[in-house]
Image (spheres, rainbow, N blue to C red):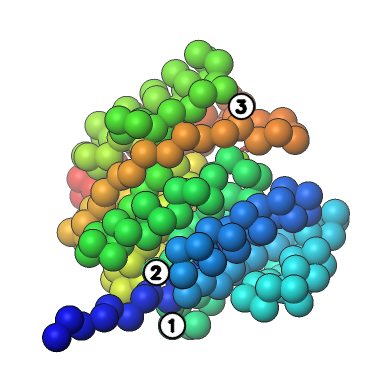
């Protein structure tokens, strides 16, 4: 007799700051994929008191769909701590898989089934990767492409990560592996948060894979990638490297 496998309980954590319009576009897309794939799925929006009313818009959608939760924080506290609060809440809700995803439509929900499949295949972390075969960043100018590739090469070499895209913020985690990784002690912010998480998974001997995504640039708003951000990233990776030596 064939045993039917129980479908995993998935929570998608989406940090938001002023993403009302983007979130209103993104959520129906996620819901529709969830329905067609027959996923057991909840969405957790972690909002930092966005002045544009993102949290209220999410709560309104929650009434419509019934599977959306909003974690309201008192002010803009940063993406790293938003993820950590979101992960804690997701684990409290006893899910099997945690997905992290941006609200700005850079991360296309059509890749969710591939990411989730990788975890079902018993990997601990699946990264939606721009730099493996089939992945791409079609809209980026050469300068932005080189900065991102350079950042990945630097982090990969110094930390021995073995991944092509450690800065991508589109990923799925096996919930039990997230617990093992002791993520609450990860202190970084921004892109470095993503790198430190991969580093942590690597240190703990957890299984990391990459699956290709095409990354679409945010339509509204300026990119925040400036000299300051690059400097913070470079020194942050270097301090992780030093910690690894001692
Ligand atoms: N809760 C919370 N969410 C944040 C914060 N900063 C950014 N976000 C959200 O985190 C996700 C990624 O941030 P982005 O601003 O898109 O960062 P990015 O993709 O590196 O930069 P862009 O090129 O501007 O898109 C988005 O959904 C943001 O709304 C924050 O301080 N708190
Ligand atoms: Mg973005």
Q: Which mark is residue 97?
A: 2
Residue 241 relative to residue 66: left or right: left
Relative to residue 210, is residue 191 drawn left or right? right
Q: Is residue 174 above or below residue 214?
A: below
**Which residue is denoted by mark 1 in the rendering?**
94
Residue 127 versus residue 78: which sits nearer the camera? 127
Residue 226: assigned label:
3
Taking the image as shown, residue 121 lies to the left or right of residue 41, namely: left
Q: Residue at x 14, y 86 (%)?
A: 1
- Closer to us: mark 1 or mark 3? 1
- Residue 197 placement: quadrant: bottom left
Label count reads 3
Q: What residue appears at the point 57 percent right and 22 percent down from the top-left corner? A: 139
Q: Is residue 114 above or below residue 72?
A: above
Between the residue at mark 3 and the residue at mark 2, the CA separation in whole angstroms equals 33 Å
Q: Position of residue 133 (x, y in %)?
A: 30, 30
Q: CA distance from mark 1 to mark 3?
A: 38 Å
| Residue 80 can be seen, yes or no | no
């Amino acid at each position: 007799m064939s045993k039917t496998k129980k479908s995993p309980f998935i929570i998608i954590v989406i940090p938001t700051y002023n993403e009302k319009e983007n979130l209103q576009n993104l959520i129906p897309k996620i819901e529709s994929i969830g329905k067609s794939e027959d996923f057991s799925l909840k969405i957790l929006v972690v909002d930092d008191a966005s002045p544009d009313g993102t949290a209220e818009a999410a709560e309104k959608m929650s009434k419509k769909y019934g599977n959306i939760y909003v974690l309201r924080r008192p002010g803009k506290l940063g993406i790293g701590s938003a993820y950590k609060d979101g992960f804690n809440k997701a684990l409290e809700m006893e899910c099997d898989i945690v997905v992290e995803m941006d609200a700005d439509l850079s991360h296309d929900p059509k890749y969710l089934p591939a990411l989730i499949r990788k975890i079902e295949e018993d990997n601990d972390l699946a990264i939606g990767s721009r730099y493996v075969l089939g992945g791409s960043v079609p809209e980026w100018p050469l300068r932005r492409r080189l900065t991102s590739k350079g950042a990945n090469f630097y982090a990969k070499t110094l930390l021995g990560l073995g991944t092509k895209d450690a800065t991508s913020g589109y990923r799925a985690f096996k919930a039990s592996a997230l617990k093992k990784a002791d993520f609450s002690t990860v202190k970084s912010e921004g892109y470095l948060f993503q790198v430190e998480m991969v580093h942590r998974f690597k240190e703990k001997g957890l299984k990391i894979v990459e699956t290709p995504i095409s990354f679409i640039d945010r339509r509204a708003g300026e990119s925040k990638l400036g000299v300051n951000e690059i400097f913070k990233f470079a020194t942050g990776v270097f301090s992780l490297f030093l910690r690894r030596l001692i």
